[in-house]
Amino acid sequence: MNQGNLHADLSIKGTQERVDVLAANGRIRIERIVSLAHQSPEGFWYDQDEDEWVAVLSGAAIIEFDDDGTVVRLQVGDWLQIPAHRRHRVTWTTPDEPTVWLAVFYS
């Protein structure tokens, strides 16, 4: 049995997001992601092989989609389903507090 707290140790080293894999097997991966004033590099788009379900547990974020320019603002409690290969990027996360995400990747 593993146990933890999603809001414990929110430290970030450098300018990259912190990614902690909480559980994984061949079909599913659950991550806690911590961002602080993070945004994807200019011109970079996530293009993932898996579907992703993501929820914001604290902070806030903005995600932009490449195919139609949709912009989604996520606040505490909001979640989003992103199909595999739907290109997207993080354009903003809160600069004054960590944005904590719970992300579930699955095929």
Image (cartoon, rainbow, N blue to C red):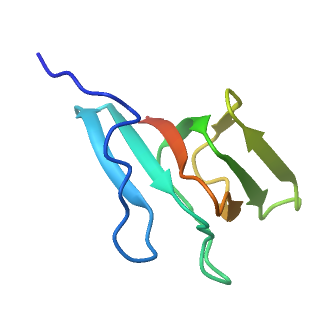
Residue 69 x/y as whole percent? 88, 62
Q: Is residue 34 above or below residue 44?
A: above
Residue 84 x/y as whole percent? 57, 46
Q: Nearer the viewer, residue 15 or 83?
A: 15
Residue 36 horizontal side relative to residue 67, left or right: left
Q: Nearer the viewer, residue 14 or 32?
A: 14
In the picture, which quadrant includes the C terminus?
A: top left
| Image quadrant where residue 93 sits | bottom right
Q: Is residue 54 above or below residue 5?
A: below
| Image quadrant where residue 42 sits | bottom right
For the view shown, which residue lies furthest in the top direction?
1
For the view shown, which residue lies furthest in the bottom direction?
42
The residue at the point 67 percent across, 83 percent down is 43
The residue at the point 54 percent across, 39 percent down is 52
Question: What is the number of callouts on the image?
Answer: 0
Q: Is residue 81 above or below residue 65?
A: above
Residue 16 horizontal side relative to residue 46, left or right: left
| Image quadrant where residue 96 sits | bottom right
In the picture, which quadrant includes the N terminus?
A: top left
The residue at the point 70 percent across, 52 percent down is 61
For the view shown, which residue lies furthest in the front direction?
96
Residue 15 horizontal side relative to residue 85, left or right: left
The residue at the point 68 percent across, 33 percent down is 76
Residue 102 x/y as whole percent? 48, 35
